[in-house]
Image (cartoon, coloured by chain):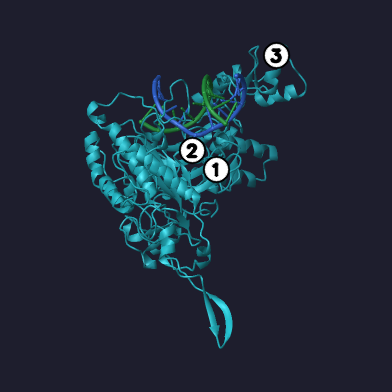
Chain colours: A cyan, B green, C blue
Amino acid sequence: MAVFLPCNDAGICMVCGVAVQSEDELLRCSTCVTLWHSPCLSNPPAVSDAATWSCPGCSVVVVDPAPAAARAAAPATATTGGELIVAAVRAIEADTTLSNAEKARRRQNLLAGRSAPDDVDDSAEDGVLNILGESFSCAFCLELLDRPVTTPCGHNFCLKCFNGWTRKGKRACAKCRQPIPSKMVQQPRINSKMDEVIRKARMPKTTNSTGLVDSHRHYIQNVDKPDRAYTTKRAKRPGKANASSGKIFVTTEPDHFGPILPKHDPMREIGVKVGETWADRLECRQWGAHFPHIAGIAGQSGKGAQSVALSGGYEDDEDHGDWFLYTGSGGRDLSGNKRTNKEQGFDQTFRNMNEALRQSCLSGHPVRVVRSHKVKHSLYAPKLGVRYDGIYRIEKCWRKIGIQERERCWKWMRDEPQPTRIKNAGKQVQRRARSNTKRLLKEFSCSICCKVMTEPLSAPCGDNFCKTCLLGAYDKQSSVRERSGGGRTLRAQKIVKRCPSCRIDISDFLVDPQINRDIMNVIESLQLKLEEGNTTKDIPYGGGDMAEEFHDDEQEENDGGGMEMDEAGCSFDVEEGDNAEDHEDNPADMDDDACGEIVVGIKEEGQQPDQKRKGDTDIGTDGPNKRTTTRVGVGQQNSKGDEAGM
DNA sequence: GGGCCCGCAGGG
DNA sequence: CCCTGCGGGCCC
């Protein structure tokens, strides 16, 4: 499969790895503004077309998705259905022979996909409509029911007509005078079954007079739906808990990649702009930013992921604004009629939506991102509602052990693995925890002695040292030099004392350096934990040769990682986690052999996601009971670049 | 604030 | 047709 990837922020082509120097070889996508290395494209545009060129990801947007047969029949000038709608609406508006009411009716018919009355034919569909019209007519307007509501006495009315009736203070059925319950008056529910039948009966089978084809059927199909989410008769709860979606306002296909542009927005003609906010997921869906009501990932395993929602559903997520780490879906017990579950019961795999993320990573497709107010720990989440945050790209996908690995209770949610697979599981969990602790401790190494700090001092420049190491570096130098000259005493001169690491003057700090108690407490806690977990291998406080310890540990992880896997009988690629930086050549370097949970990392243009992150290090797992996460780095293309109308 | 439950939407 | 799913509202 051909892989198309853009240049990264440093101007290095992610396909060939070459730093693109020549302007002639750089191509800028006219849609998402990403830079591309033209020699690495299979079909680079001619120089004259470069200004209007769209990258492989964004070109999905403009390709006419109609079936081949329909395409063949279409005019040579390829236009999207959205453009056709807009053109048709404008033609109606421009027709001076029509009254405003007639224009409105024609517009409605156009958007509903209905034929104009003068070109109605005697199709079978109309026959069906006639049959429906006899039974499904509203007692008020005598027309075919529009968004039907049904009273307890069994009579049906258009929602609009019914509301008009009750607003007049009427509380009895217009047909049989039976009382209408106040609950129905307050919140009438659409009879979804009737609504569906009527909509289907109205549906044009093929093309219609507007020239719209199947590609926009999904749009046409929903135009009869209410503007807002509604509860069907079936729903046991009011409000949006069990609500059905209101109409989709945009013409984008459900599998449309990239931004929602003005041409997809016949209603407002502005598209969906970065920062647009909706009250909830159902409203967000109506504007096409993220279609699934609950699921966090919109996509297809064979095609890619079109959008993701950050809603705080997975605690492994990290949001850094311009990039974030996103946990894949799955691995959770949804029995008992649950839709979500905080507990990570078992491992995630690269299937379904997770595979879709991987596909998008491989192909470099743009991913729409929405953030929900529900991400409490994110500084970038909106205070209210759901906000569209623009186009990102998936940088990497990988798997790691999730947070819950540490807290889980042991139970098998699926078939228990063969004994050979879990032979050394307990031991390995211990080792894993121990190496985590060690790794953290390593972060607290003194920049002078390279051992874990004793009495840590944090200099104002940001460097940290053992108290004895730092003070020892200046020996017994006094802080000032007394000066005298010509028989008179001069003002004492401050002696400059530079930080051993960064050479910044820290002499003021050294006058009365205070120990960083917080760091010391953490170091003590970590060391205590290490001692508890391993009484045989004592690590002396500040005195042990931690550098050597860690070196050994890294060896064990990088080299022995494979061995560990072999012991566990699990065929993991060793190249994961800590070695995330190893994936630079292949941002989509991932492992199929699933064992755990999946996380996605997402990034904005202008920065690289950390190539190596604390906590992403424990990719090797020792059995399917560990929650490894796969991370996919996704980078934002341009925070404003996908604003509609750009 | 957490647990529970539900219809809906979409993938496969 | 079954399964999955980073919702949302109510109850405790």
Which of the two discs, 3 and 2, labels the residue nearer the N terminus?
3
**Marked residue chain, label 1:** A
The numbered mark at residue A216 is 2
**Marked residue chain, label 2:** A
Using the image as rendered, state which of residue A72 and residue A472 is in the foreground: A472
| Quadrant of the image occupied by residue A397 | top left
Q: Is residue A75 visible?
A: no
Residue at label 1? A85
The Cα–Cα distance between marks 1 and 3, rounded to whole angstroms, is 40 Å
Q: Position of residue A612 (x, y in %)?
A: 37, 51
Query: Of tags 1 and 2, which is closer to the observer?
Result: 2
Residue at label 3? A175
Under circle 2, the secondary element is helix
- All told, the count of numbered labels is 3
Q: For the residue carrying disc 2, how many other residues have a C-alpha within 10 Å: few (<14), some (14-19), or many (20+)?
A: some
Relative to A510, residue A314 above or below: above
Q: Are marks 1 and 2 in contact (CB under 8 Å)?
A: yes
Q: Mark 3 is on which residue type?
A: Lys
Q: Mark 1 is on which residue type?
A: Ile
Indicate left or right for C12 with A212 as reference: right
Kindly identify the residue that appears in the image at 34 percent across and 41 percent down.
A434
